[in-house]
Amino acid sequence: MSETDTQTTDGTETARRPGRERGREDGKFGRYGGQYVPEALMPAIEELTDAYERYVLDNEDGFMDEFRRRLADFGGRPTPLQRADRLSERYGRDVYLKREDLLHGGAHKLNNALGQALLAKYMGKERIIAETGAGQHGTATAMAAAHLDMPCTIYMGERDINRQRPNVFRMKLNGAEVKPVTTGRGTLKEAISETMRDWAATVEDTHYVIGSVVGPHPFPVMVRDFQAVISEEAREQAREKTGQLPTDIVACAGGGSNTMGAFAGFVDDGAVSLHAVEAGGSTLEVDEEAGVAPNSASLYTGEEGVLHGARTKLLQDRDGQIMESHSVSSGLDYAGVGPELAYLVDEGRVNPVAVDDDAALAGFHRLSRTEGIIPALETAHAFGFLEDHHEELGDRVVVNVSGRGDKDLEAVIEETDQREIAGAPDMSMFTEGI
Amino acid sequence: MADEPTATGDGDRSDSADPADSAARVTAEGTRANSAAIAEAFADGPAYVPYLVVGDPDAASSKAYVEALDRGGADVIELGLPFSEPIAEGPTIQEALVRALDAGMTPDRFFAFAEGLDVDAALVCMTYYNLIYQYGAASGPRPFVERAAAAGIEGLVVPDLPAEEADPLREACDEFGLDLVFIVAPTTRGDRLDRIMERVSGYVYVQARLGTTGARSDVSEQTTESLDRLSGYDVPKAVGFGISTGEHAERIVAGGADGVIVGSALVDIVGDGVANDRPTAAVADRLESLSRELKEGAERGYAARVGAAESQ
Ligand SMILES: Cc1ncc(COP(=O)(O)O)c(C=O)c1O
């Protein structure tokens, strides 16, 4: 039994929290999950499953103790649960922010990257590779690799490299090699495929640090378990601050790692509503002919299929070809989603919602202006949801601030200039100079 | 012994080559064989198994190219049905898949293409699981396999479907008389190898090296090791990944393989034709002559192996 379960609950509940253990046994979440990968990767995946069970679940050699110590000392955990005073006033209910933007690196991504890099070390792997979309996972992996003294290669779509330049600099500063991926549209989907190809050639000495709760078993459960520290802390902090559990948890969802991290500790608390906010992009309609979905709402509009090692909900055309997704935020720009989220949506446990680019940008500016927190564009989708749907929520809402927005400033200047956003500052002085 | 010349027990194959019996069967040694045509392709001498992407760069040229492989001596032809996320492919085949998708290839057009081919070789479809899973109105792999069988496809290779997830597809293949080929990697050993060999039929695809597809200039030692590990299993062993010359084919067959699978070296010729705007007939000629070279290489390797076995 993992200590992660006992750490933040009062001990008497641990026996009755099946939601925290879902998928650990066989990597299946109802009809979703599984291991759809080339044969060359299967032995590595079996080796990883074994390491996950021993080190993460059974804390062999004190792995989890070292992980928690490094998350505290290097990462800066725990992160605060902060009451957002202006938003609380605006929406007529208590809004709390789980401040993952304050984690080292500026996003929740380090929880997972540090966990997996450390696990790679325990497994005796010599090198780590990772894909990245927004560059946050790449940055977190590069930091973790430098911290643990391991060489590291990051695959990143060419288009994302252009959208997220500050993160590319950060990865390089931390000593990582950044390899541009030019296939397809050059976003996260292509970067994952390319990293899997590298791994297929190098499995014997290399660990693939996947960046979200996606991919073949054991990645979805393992990444969830590393990210679950978010909700373990938040659950405890909410009780301390309010004496009760929250009524609602809101988190954005690309692959869904901050989402599952924010939900995991509450999945078994039936009274707590869980809202997964996806990128609605410019519209929810798809262009079958061109194979383009101008959104990334795979939970909300997707259909069951198999991508990147797992059966899950996907944006795909009638034949099963994967669509090119779109979002103003690179980190949500993905045609798939974690299989556990697909399952929880089918079960009615998680409420999937889509927020479009405009509402996300408005949310970005609102949080920046009124609370003094510049959120990542990914996170901003959660605040777009809050604005439009707060009346459907309970009295104590926790929003997971999955990351900070410094990486997005160039994109925000450009996107804001193209829109009328109430209360947004005039950006023309920046765009004219560009 | 790894280099036994008739490594696959001819008795079983002539058994399963009985066209009257197309139902699933397990031979005495536990080897499945559904397709008589595939069994025959491996029956006397080494099989030359070329791969091309269907619809690359367009359906009409692609038909000419596949038929050129057949004239060049193909025993089995692996027809690639393009998928948008081909995680097992290297750059050469990725680019070909993109060309075919851009030219409008779909599963239905693929089946129509297969039906229109004038070839003697047995046809095998190589694609990714999502396309198989999504095909048709009913969910699951059955509609795809039913349609494939109607189009004259004799077997399937699905690089992202490991044995653990393959039972529904295995069942559908047995129902419609198709073989299901699995890939064995240099890293596949022990229980995993048994699990795969329990489910494989037709032939086993021995991946010559780690990594993705792509033509290479040398032939890896991992191949010999893999063939050694497989020597106890009675199913034809076709080696692929990186083979590009007749000399490679010769060495691989001399080393114990029952067949050679060649993809990227052929796809390179198509890609070169596109890049340099070469006439379809010229590209087809090059495909045919490389095929001849590969097939002759495989036959030389086989003769050397038989000779070595006889002189022992
Ligand atoms: C700040 C931030 N939030 C959310 C995401 C989306 O990832 P996930 O859905 O796995 O949490 C990203 C991805 O890059 C991110 O950088």
Image (cartoon, coloured by chain):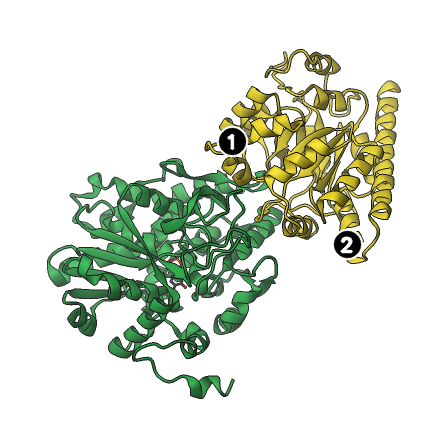
Instruction: Answer yes or no: disc 2 within 8 Å of ligand 1.
Output: no
Q: Residue furthest left?
A: A243
Residue identified by numbered label 2: B274
Locate residue A50, reporting x and y percent: 44, 40
Q: Nearer the viewer, residue A201 or B56?
A: B56
Q: Nearer the viewer, residue B252 or A50?
A: B252
Q: Residue at x 45, y 77 (%)?
A: A414
Q: Secondary structure at mark 2?
A: helix
Q: In the image, which disc is placed on residue B141?
A: 1
Name the amino acid type tagged 2.
Answer: Val
Locate residue B31, reporting x and y percent: 63, 18
Q: Colour of chain A?
A: green
Query: Residue A262 appears in which quarter of the rendering?
Result: bottom left
Q: Quadrant of the N terminus of chain A?
A: top left
Name the amino acid type tagged 1.
Answer: Pro
Q: Colour of chain B?
A: yellow
Locate residue A75, reporting x and y percent: 36, 65
